[in-house]
Image (cartoon, helix red, strand yellow):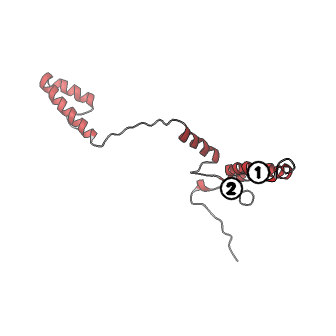
Amino acid sequence: MDMIEIRIPKEIKNYREKLFFGLTLRQCICAGAALLICVPLYIFGNKILLQEAVSWAVILIAAPLMFAGFFRYNDMQFEQFAVEFFFHYFTPQKRVYSYEPIFMEFRNAYLAEELAAEIAEKHGNSAVKKFLRKAGLKNGKC
């Protein structure tokens, strides 16, 4: 007696419920819409236009519908991807350059200590303590 094998995805986000012929509901709707539009167009369009023109019209209508149903990129559906693609390539990007090396914290602490020493020479110890409190240092140490 053979056991029925059930496929369980490792990641729950990757699970898609299959509805009809192994297709998801979204894929069924898009494929059905493509068939409902393109089959009558091909059958009745031959009476109005040349067969080559009708074939191209069917392709140009069916391709985006099927693409919308079957396309997934980084867990985004086609319309989400299209919006992100548009904003990334066709709108101005706001890029902020911010770089602070790791040693800047030590450098700033060193400069604060030097400044505290200068203040101590001029104004005395109470001014130094006040300055160190504002700088976030305690007794001249990091």
Quadrant of the image for the C terminus? top left
Q: Which residue is mark 2?
A: 17
The total of numbered circles placed on residues is 2
Label 2 Cα crowd, 10 Å radius (few <14 / some 14-19 / many 20+): few
2 vs 1, front mark: 1
Is any atom of residue 37 visible in this view?
yes
Q: Which element carries disc 1, helix, strand or loop?
A: helix
Q: Which residue is pictured at 24% across the width and 38% down the height?
A: 107
Mark pair 2, 1: CA separation: 29 Å
Q: Between 134 and 65, which is closer to the camera in this rendering?
A: 65
Q: Which residue is pictured at 25% across the width and 35% down the height?
A: 108
Q: Position of residue 77 (x, y in %)?
A: 63, 48
Q: Which residue is pictured at 47% across the width and 35% down the height?
A: 94
Depicted 92 relative to depicted 57: above or below: above
Is any atom of residue 29 visible in this view?
no
Instruction: Please state which amino acid type lies under the numbered disc 1.
Output: Val
Q: Position of residue 83 (x, y in %)?
A: 60, 41
Q: Position of residue 48 (x, y in %)?
A: 85, 47
Q: Position of residue 76 (x, y in %)?
A: 60, 48
Instruction: Please state which amino acid type lies under the numbered disc 2.
Output: Glu
* Residue 58, numbered label: 1
Label 1 Cα crowd, 10 Å radius (few <14 / some 14-19 / many 20+): many
